[in-house]
Image (cartoon, coloured by chain):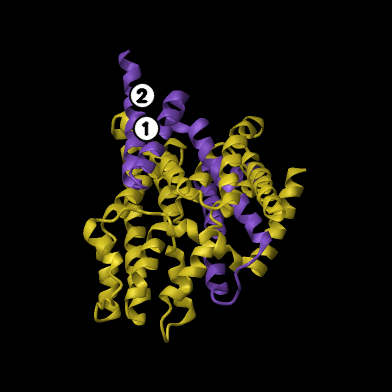
Amino acid sequence: MTGNLNGVMGEFWWPFAVILTGAAATYVWRALGIALSGRVGTDSRIFEWIACVAYALLAALIARMIIFPIGPLAETYLADRLGAAVGALAIYFLTRNNLLAGVSVGTAALVALTWSRTIF
Amino acid sequence: MYSRVLNGFRANLFKISLLCAGHAIALLTPAGSRHNIPQASHRSSMAEDLTTRDFGTARAALRGGARESFGVPMLVLCGSYLGFGALVRESGLAIWHGLFSTLTSWALPGQVALVELYSVGAPLLVIASAVALTNARLLPMAMTLMPTIRGANVPRWVYYATAHVIAVTGWAAAMRVCPTLPSEQRLAYFAGFSGTLWISTLGATAIGFALADTVPAYVTLGLVFLNPIYFMLVFASDLRQRSRMLALVFGTVIGPPLYLWSPDWSLVVAGLAAGTLAYGISAAREARS
């Protein structure tokens, strides 16, 4: 199906349709939250399950972005990406959840590690 | 087989969302409130101060919110959107696709998931499900934000329009600041704060796209790596509740092997399998104790 529509709409217009679908799938949560605010209680097992699925999916996404990246990160070494990720986590917790420090150290570490490979 | 599982799940998800949406608050909002995005020092001292602030008018509160959005939150957010812009280019998409995505979605994890899944040729259904699941956190965030920004005599459509800019950074700021404001200034403050962030990230998306090809490859690497590191840290601080912590651990462990098995379906399957396992284990533990 994707292939056919892609063929009909072309490489330029088809992504807009995909992005718009994604936008709808995003906005629906926000609108639903507004619609339901103040009207529902807060105690359900089934929603805890949904929360778990959402969190597991995000974790899988993040792990995949680090372990099997696409684009430019695919050129870097897995060990470097994992090392930088661990470094970011360490700094983040050592600085008591300082996001800027963790993010800066993590990205700088990957750049430095990758660069150092070109020297040695 | 997986499409059947997925369809069933999506049907359930819709029903469940309608029926039980409120229960997400207890589960998901601690996550949001613990996103300790660092503030400039004068801002954090202000956060401790619970005395009422007054901008004078709603219009002034809108401007005040816009002014206060400048700071570390905007820096980290725009840095991440630079990375998103670069990712859009590396994925073979046009700058207009990136800008359209930031304009219409404005929820980074979902945007990245969409671009990555699209670039590996995933079917539309898989992309839509992954984006929807990735952004489910927006529901409890919107529900908890509403009472905080609600004012008198505001038409309902204004809330639905403002809902579009609900995202972690602005949400966290509004939850902290809005209760200290007169009620007629709260919505304006949030709109000014989040709206400014939204516009800024449009610029960051464009700049990131432009930078991806013109700056040294090492800088592009760092920008693209910002995305996963930013998400990882935001969720790493959220280890208080056992079921969610387990879900994060299981998802991390089974996600990559599943990706080798099926790039298209790994995220949805990993989410369902790891999430269900995490929920089952913590529910069983609760039942025993």
Q: Position of residue A14 (x, y in %)?
A: 55, 48
The chain letter corresponding to yellow is B
Same chain for marks 2 and 1? no
- When asked about the image quadrant of residue A22, the answer is bottom right
Taking the spot 59% from the left edge, 48% from the top edge, the residue there is B130
Which is nearer the eye, B217 or B53? B53
Q: Which mark is residue A114?
A: 2
| Residue occupied by mark 1 | B221
| Residue furthest front as drawn | B289
Q: Amino acid at mark 2?
A: Thr
Q: Amino acid at mark 1?
A: Leu
Identify the image quadrant of the C terminus of chain B: bottom right
Residue B128 is at least partly visible in this image: no
| Residue furthest left as drawn | B42
Q: Could you tell me if the residues under marks 2 and 1 are in contact, i.e. CB atoms within 8 Å? A: yes
In the rendered image of this protein, which colour is used for chain A? purple
Q: Position of residue A58 (x, y in %)?
A: 54, 46
Element class at badge 1: helix
